[in-house]
Image (cartoon, rainbow, N blue to C red):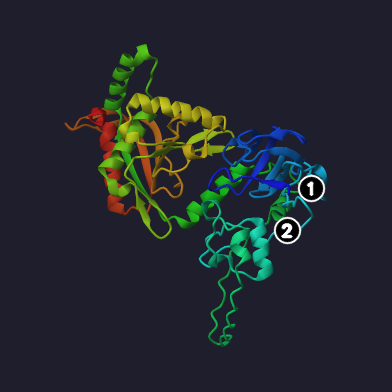
Amino acid sequence: MPTEILMPALSPTMEEGTLAKWLVKEGDTVQSGDLLAEIETDKATMEFEAVDEGVIGKILIAEGTENVKVNTAIAVLLGDGESAADIGSAPAAPAPAAVETPAAAPVATAAPAPAAPAAANGTRIFASPLARRIAADKGVDLSQIVGSGPHGRIVKADVDGATAAPKAAAPAPAAAATAAPAPAKAPTVSAEGVAKIYADREYTEIPLDGMRKTIAARLTEAKSTIPHFYLRRDIKLDALMAFRAQINKGLESRGVKLSVNDFIIKACANALQSVPAANAVWAGDRVLQLKPSDVAVAVAIDGGLFTPVLKDADKKSLSALSSEMKDLAGRARNKKLAPHEYQGGSFAISNLGMFGIDNFDAVINPPHGAILAVGAGVKKPVIGDDGDITIATVMSVTLSVDHRVIDGALGAELLKAIVDNLENPMGMLA
């Protein structure tokens, strides 16, 4: 029987993607490991490999199609002795302009699979489209089934032998006098409503790509669900600038030039080791305290940003951090990072000092416990230890903290450790 090739989930958070380019055509013979297509996720363009051998019998999703849901059939693979006639009445591939592509069955057109179910606690249940259809027909509650597929996914075999649970009796309606009024919803404005407001003004409509949608969703989630609080400090950079100039002079022969940002990464990584209770992330019903210092750094790209993660940053030299950061930032701008390179970490750095920003408040990137917003180093008059007024290079930083993970005193301790490292840079190399 012909085999469906499904839209892959190329990262744990991927729900849909763009089928950017087919690397094969109908009639091509493929082996396991051969490249089939290029898939654009919200963060990167990745190559999709074949897992079986056979002949590409039919391409169901045209290249350039956006918003293709994970597990949608995108092509049909024919095995030994099978021909295109065995595919049956598979639907034709949609045009690239299509917004959503329903899953296509290889043998006969079937009713669309029910929407991905969720357990009572809101957790998404991962099940194949066929398993969901069978469960819906039999009245089976998928939340009561343990999946045997990859990563616990529920497959057809899991629901074939399952029986529907008896329906619980409906509770008696509560008395009208005691019924609590439904909370009033905040008014929302639709896209059409906003467009009407500007109907008499000239504008250009810019559709949201996958990255912009993800950024919007994650930042809305962050500001809506994370109880942020903010800690601010000024850092005197004169000792660091002199130390950096001395190191860079010695590294000229190796072609290495350290930036202030490299020192900030190292300072934050070392601080997380000095204050281990702050090296933590929020995990829904618990806090995970990490042992390594995995520090994410925001990198601006066209249309969005990446936060590549420098793992074990406390154990790496400044020159190693500098080289790794340059590599990650370069590949981030070309959308060539693999998911494991921009996921994880417990702490992030967002530096806008190079744009002349004095200070700002950064939004925490969940599930991180904190993010450091870094402003520009500016020469200011300061009062020295001897009481005299002098000129110093001062950098303002703001630590945004998730109060569920880090309390005020602990956040202050972490920020003090960062400041101490940057104002006494030689100590970071000890």
> Is any part of residue 343 visible from this angle?
yes
Q: Position of residue 205 (x, y in %)?
A: 71, 42
Spatial CA span between label 2 and label 1: 18 Å
The kind of secondary structure element at disc 1 is: helix
Q: Of 183 and 213, which appears nearest the observer?
A: 213
Which of discs 2 and 1 lies nearer the camera? The answer is: 1
Q: Quadrant location of residue 427?
A: top left
Q: Which residue is mark 2?
A: 112
Residue 141 against residue 201 in the figure, above or below: below
In the rendered image, the residue lying farthest to the top is: 253
The kind of secondary structure element at disc 2 is: loop
**Which residue appears at 57% of the width and 43% of the height?**
10
Q: Which residue is mark 1?
A: 87
Q: Position of residue 100 (x, y in %)?
A: 72, 49
What is the three-letter code of the residue carrying label 2? Pro
The quadrant in which the C terminus is found is: top left
Q: Position of residue 409 (x, y in %)?
A: 27, 52
> Is any part of residue 404 visible from this angle?
no
Label located before the other in sequence (2 or 1): 1
Q: Of 252 and 188, which appears nearest the observer?
A: 252
